[in-house]
Amino acid sequence: GAVVSQHPSWVICKSGTSVKIECRSLDFQATTMFWYRQFPKQSLMLMATSNEGSKATYEQGVEKDKFLINHASLTLSTLTVTSAHPEDSSFYICSASYGAGTSGSHGETQYFGPGTRLLVL
Amino acid sequence: KQEVTQIPAALSVPEGENLVLNCSFTDSAIYNLQWFRQDPGKGLTSLLLIQSSQREQTSGRLNASLDKSSGRSTLYIAASQPGDSATYLCAVTWYGGATNKLIFGTGTLLAVQP
């Protein structure tokens, strides 16, 4: 149980184009989804947190107009990298959590997707 | 600033050896600490989660300990196998932060030689 999928698993695009990455919770309803970015030989950095039906909360330094997040249902969140540039090339990983608590409570396990590798030429 | 550090960055051991991975964190007011495994080009698999009130957790050949006062956690792997080769990440959630915000260390790349 608690499987999270991402699509596509990898994508190559030209500079200036937009890329959409999907994150789905396959067998549970995710109240919260998280988007992380991982550059080579670096750790995961949280980009934003999204709750179903509300606007995402972005971490400091992450441009919300460049990284558009939509969490339209309890099983799907999308990350759109707008006007992608080579410096946006990275490994993007989503995670999803479900819990009995309200938002703001800790301890809800995050289940991670397999990641999407983006290469912008 | 709340930070997580892992040493060593890389480790190579022969099969069958017991080993210890280290994780240190600033600010002892943690809510929990987790250890993850990441295979090359893949997502994360949760291995162990230690709540702040706990001192250790065990799962099979893995044992994770937590010492909040010194800001350290260790992951002990017994009788290592080639299949254990992966990057191991520790991540901390602190009190007072946003919901479930995980701060990750940079990881330890483990290679177990057959």
Image (cartoon, coloured by chain):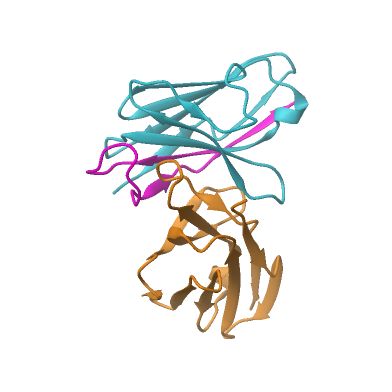
Chain colours: A cyan, B orange
Identify the image quadrant of residue B90. Answer: bottom right
- Provide residue B82's location: percent of width, then percent of height: 58, 73
**Pick the front one: A5 or A85:** A85
Residue reaching furthest left? A100
> Residue drawn at (47%, 60%), measured in percent from left and top?
B29
Taking A96 as reference, is A89 left or right?
A: right
Q: Is residue A111 magenta?
A: yes
- Provide residue A58's location: percent of width, then percent of height: 53, 29
Rendered position, B76 above or below B86: below
Taking A117 as reference, is A93 left or right?
A: left
Q: Is residue B74 magenta?
A: no
Q: Identify the image quadrant of the C terminus of chain B.
A: bottom right
> Residue drawn at (37%, 21%), measured in percent from left and top?
A54
Rendered position, B98 above or below A85: below
Q: Which residues make up the magenta segment?
A: A93-121
Rendered position, A106 above or below B11: above
- Provide residue A120's location: percent of width, then percent of height: 73, 26
Total label count? 0
Rendered position, B79 above or below A75: below
- Provide residue A121's location: percent of width, then percent of height: 77, 24
Identify the image quadrant of residue B58. Answer: bottom left
Identify the image quadrant of residue A56. Answer: top left
> Residue drawn at (55%, 60%), measured in percent from left and top?
B27
> Residue drawn at (46%, 36%), measured in percent from left and top?
A34
Taking A23 as reference, is A47 left or right?
A: right
